[in-house]
Amino acid sequence: MLNGAMEMMIGSVRVVAQAGSAIYIPPDTPHSAPVLGKIEPVKVVQVYAPGGPEQRFKEWEQEP
C-alpha cells in the first residue's frame, strides 16, 4: 500500500493494512477491503503472479 488504510477480510482473517503494508491474497480466496476513514485516499499497487486475473480489468477500459 502506498497510502491510506483498509480493514481487510481475507477469507475469515481480519487484517488492517496501511501505508507500507504488503498483503498476500491466496488464489480463489474471498476478500474485501473497506477503506478506513475518508481523509486520505487509498492507493495500492496490485501484483498478479502468475499473471492472468488482471484481465478482468480490461472490461473497464473505455474506447476512445
Image (cartoon, rainbow, N blue to C red):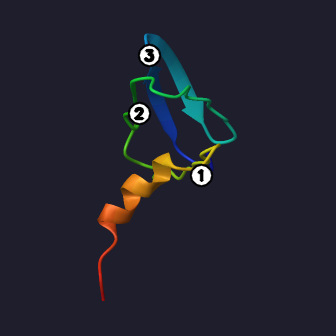
Task: Of the two numbered discs 1 and 2 on the same chain, state the one appearing first in sequence.
Answer: 2
Per the model, the C-alpha gap separating discs 1 and 3 is: 20 Å
What residue is shown with label 1? Answer: 45
Residue at horizontal 55 percent and vertical 28 percent from the top: 25
Mark 1 vs mark 3: give the one in front. 3
- Residue 62 vs 13, above or below: the answer is below
User: Number of labelled discs?
Assistant: 3
Q: Are marks 1 and 2 in contact (CB under 8 Å)?
A: no
Where is residue 20 drawn, in percent x and y? 70, 40
Q: Is residue 40 above or below residue 17?
A: below
Residue 13 is left or right of residue 38, and the answer is: right
Front position among marks 2 and 3: 3
How far, Cα to Cα, is label 1 from label 2?
A: 14 Å
Q: Mark 2 or mark 3: which comes first in sequence?
A: 3
Q: CA distance from mark 2 to mark 3?
A: 12 Å
Question: Image quadrant for the N terminus?
Answer: top right
Task: Give the SS element for disc 1.
Answer: loop
Residue 33's disc number: 2
**Local secondary structure at mark 2:** loop
- For label 3, count other residues whose C-alpha is less than 10 Å away and answer few (under 14), some (14-19) or many (20+): few
Q: Amino acid at mark 2?
A: Ala
- The residue type indicated by label 1 comes to Val
